[in-house]
Amino acid sequence: METTASHAPPTAPGLPLVGDTFALAGDVGAFFTRQYLQLGPVFRVRALHRAFTVLAGPEANLFVTREGSKHLRSRETWMEFDNELGAARSMVSMDGAEHARMRKAQQPGYSRSFIHEHLHDVIGITRREVAEWPLDKPIPGVYALQRIITEQLGTIAAGVSPRDYLDDMIVFVRTLLAARVTHQRPALLTRTPRFRRARKRVEELYATVRAVHEPDRRSGGQSDLVDDLMALHHVDPQFLPETDLMPAVLGPFIAGLDTVGSTCAFMLYALLKHPDLLDRMTAEADASFAHGTLTAEAVRHLDVTHRVALETLRMYPIAPAIKRTVSNTFEFAGYTIPAGEKVIVATTVPHHLPQYFPDPERFDIERYTPERQEHRQPGVFVPFGAGSHVCLGAGFAEVSIAATMATIVHEVELALDPPDYILKTSPVPTPSPDDRFRFRVARRRGRAAEASSGRQD
């Protein structure tokens, strides 16, 4: 069959020998956006001995959504990650029918309705953590939010508090992702004593979760995500063997570190840099807590909070691109992309294109009003990925972000420390505010102020 497609996409300019290695290890979203504007929706990049074809722009997102399941697979991207956990495969590395089945099994535990049922826990955990923040002393921004989110996810979805394991979980997950998935760091890091110690602790956490979910200890209790996984394992141990349980069972703990936790940290920075938005969101939160706590209905009507979250996800996406392998040859934007090719889908490039989001570097929550709805344009707003592997917990995450951040601004008045801090993003393994992002509690308010007053009395 005749084809008019070319076989040689343009190559992004790079340095001798190392190619685009440094660009891919830095602000990869900005790099892909520049190349898209210069080279179009398909181009090649090089990183030392590896080469990739990049698909970018809304046209790439629409292609992945409509055709990705026929032409792209995720197995090679996550194979080393699975191997480190002793697994042959996991939900993120599955494709086709088995991926659909695994998603269906885990969907209830990652659903919006599930977290709505546990809002009391979400708010209670957030309040307890915030109550421990000292007055007028610098608090590490990302770490503080990671503590809250992982505690929520672990307690709600897995029935176990990860608080005592958090530091080891951070070392384990971030090293594993950077060395075995994104390849921003050398694989030798997974052989260091520090990583091995963290791995043993994570294995302890896994064993604890497994023990808590033994059938004789779960009778009469409300089922959670791990209960669903164990049920699938017992019903069909060939589909979900014991060797493949670890990545699935640890999923809630892993998900909180570099996704929801980082998004909340970015959101907090944006609020502290825009006092007018912070005032509006605080007033909204106070009104929603007027009767004591947030309800699911109240969360649904957190309009300002929701729009601040959407703009955070647009400007500071924590998953700026996805890696895949071509399973079946296809044509895209006039080029033939052959089977076996390694591709990167630069999903969030449209987030920074002025034709879709005017003045894209300005933090503007009015983009999401009914009058503008800039994010509703096809293929331009994809903070949770695209295609069959779109984030299963997107709805869960949206509720968690809204409820957590509304609780924080209701409980305490915060300020940047130092006040003139300008955001620097750490790109490894996924974007997050750097370690210099800190805040301080200027004043306790709401229940936090009442509790503090009671302690003083």
Image: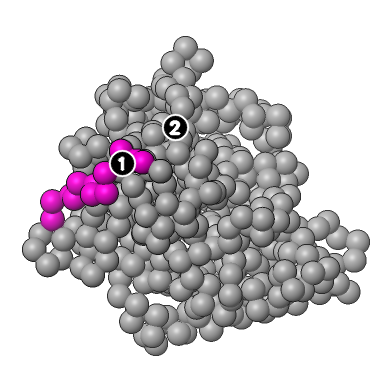
To which quarter of the image does residue 177 belong?
bottom left
Closest to the observer, 287 or 322: 322
Left or right position of 234 against 49: right
- In this rendering, the answer to whether 92 lies above or below 111 is below
Query: Looking at the picture, how far across and down is residue 411, in whole percent?
Result: 54, 41
Q: Residue at x 47, y 57 (%)?
A: 327
| Crowd rating for badge 2 (residues with CA inside 10 Å; few <14, some 14–19, many 20+) | many
Q: Residue at x 19, y 58 (%)?
A: 20
Query: Looking at the picture, how far across and down is residue 387, in whole percent?
Result: 52, 44
Query: Looking at the picture, how far across and down is residue 262, in whole percent?
Result: 43, 51
To which quarter of the image does residue 164 belong?
bottom right
Left or right position of 171 against 124: left
| Crowd rating for badge 1 (residues with CA inside 10 Å; few <14, some 14–19, many 20+) | some
Left or right position of 235 against 13: right
Does the rendering let one see residue 120? no
Dot 2 lies on which element?
Answer: loop
Magenta span has 160?
A: no
- In this rendering, the answer to whether 328 lies above or below 299 is below
Lower position in the chain sequence, tag 2 or tag 1 = 1
The span picked out in magenta is 2-14
Amino acid bearing label 2: Gly
- In this rendering, the answer to whether 381 lies above or below 251 is above
Q: How many marks?
A: 2
Q: Which residue is mark 1?
A: 5
Closest to the observer, 420 or 90: 90
Magenta span has 13?
A: yes
Amino acid bearing label 1: Ala
Q: Which residue is mark 2?
A: 379
Give the quadrant of the N terminus: top left
Q: Which mark is residue 108?
A: none
